[in-house]
Amino acid sequence: MTGLLSSVRMRWLAAIIVVANGAFPALWIVLTSFKSEAELTQKPITYWPQNATLANYIAAFRDQPLPVYLLNSAVIATISTIVSLFVSALAAYALARLRMKYRDFILTGIIAVSMFPLVTLMVPLFEIMRGLNLLNSYWALVLPYTVLNLPICTLMLVSFFQDIPRDIENAAMLDGCTRLGSLWRMVVPLAAPGVFTAGIIAFVNAWDEFLLSMSLNAATQYRTLPVGIQMYQGEWAFPWHIISAALVIAMVPIIIVVLLFQDRVVSGITSGGLKG
């Protein structure tokens, strides 16, 4: 009994450490966004704002075209997520249902490709986008983000598609559905938790990406939010209070998306964890 209680306590302790590790930085950014610049530099450090102010949020919109950055990130992340899910659903269905001689080799290749450091792809991607005359456009980021998200989306959907009984597809095809029709009308809806989970991962990856965005879209009207937030930094100044306000604004869309699809995402993650 004592050993069981000790095990339970250790699990609770581990859970608290994990939650605190993830929540504390976000909480610190939120609190910093309500502090004045003078309060940030005073000693001893204050954890809670002494005179909370919304001036930092006003400055975040005044100093940089933040709505433009938000719109660019939303458009690019949304389009790349939709295209990634569409292509990865087709690929995952083929890997899960069709008899392929080198199926395991293909899956291994997908995993290997997903492990390539992004920095090694910078020069080839830049040359390709320049050759296609796509630099400083939405497509300069939509296409790379789609390609980079395909491996994780495909691998996630394969595991879900494999657990859907073939009899459902056979019944749909007997009723007149084509194989593609059974995929979109039967398989994808039944694998909705996995589709939503893959979609959230793809969206967040595209929303948070910085390196490609900084390199491929230098024009102000096409900058995404991560690069735009960097623009608040001056040569001799680093306005943490304003940057924190911009970061809080950047977190809001992600929080809304996760809250809207929370049940689906939790179900997808749980199901994926049980399928090993």
Image (cartoon, rainbow, N blue to C red):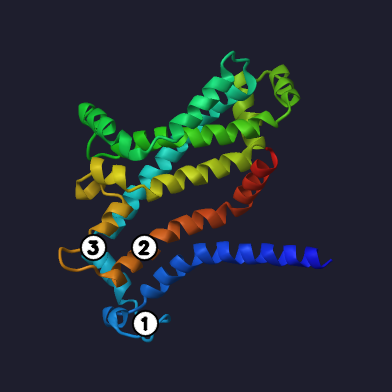
- Dot in front, 1 or 2: 1
Measure how far apart labels 1 and 2 are at the Cα level: 21 Å
Q: Where is residue 251 in the image (x, y as percent from the top left)?
A: 42, 60
How far across and how far down the image is residue 260, in percent?
56, 54
Q: Residues within 10 Å of mark 1 (few under 14, many from 20)?
A: few
Viewport quadrant of the N terminus:
bottom right
Q: Mark 1 points at which residue?
A: 45
Among numbered discs 2 and 3, the one appearing first in the sequence: 3
Left or right: residue 71 compared with residue 265: left
Q: Nearer the viewer, mark 1 or mark 3?
A: 1
Look at the numbered disc 2 and give the secondary structure of its residue.
Answer: helix
Residue that lies at the very extreme toward the front in this rendered image: 3
Which of the 4 quarters of the picture holds residue 272? top right
User: Sequence-wise, which precedes: disc 1 or disc 3?
Assistant: 1
Query: What is the crowding at mark 2: few (fewer than 14 residues within 10 Å), some, or many (at least 20)?
Result: some
- Is residue 40 or residue 68 the one in the foreground? 40
Q: Could you tell me which residue is drawn at 60 percent across and 66 percent down?
A: 16
Residue 141 sits above or below residue 209 on the image: above
| Total tally of numbered discs in the picture | 3
Q: Is residue 155 left or right of residue 28?
A: right
Q: Which amino acid does label 1 sit on?
A: Ile
Q: Is residue 179 above or below residue 36?
A: above
- Would you call the spot at circle 3 few (<14 residues within 10 Å), some (14-19), or many (20 or more)? some
Eyeballing the image, is 233 above or below 54? above
Q: Residue furthest right?
A: 1
SS at mark 3?
Answer: loop
Mark 1 and mark 2 in contact? Answer it, CB < 8 Å: no
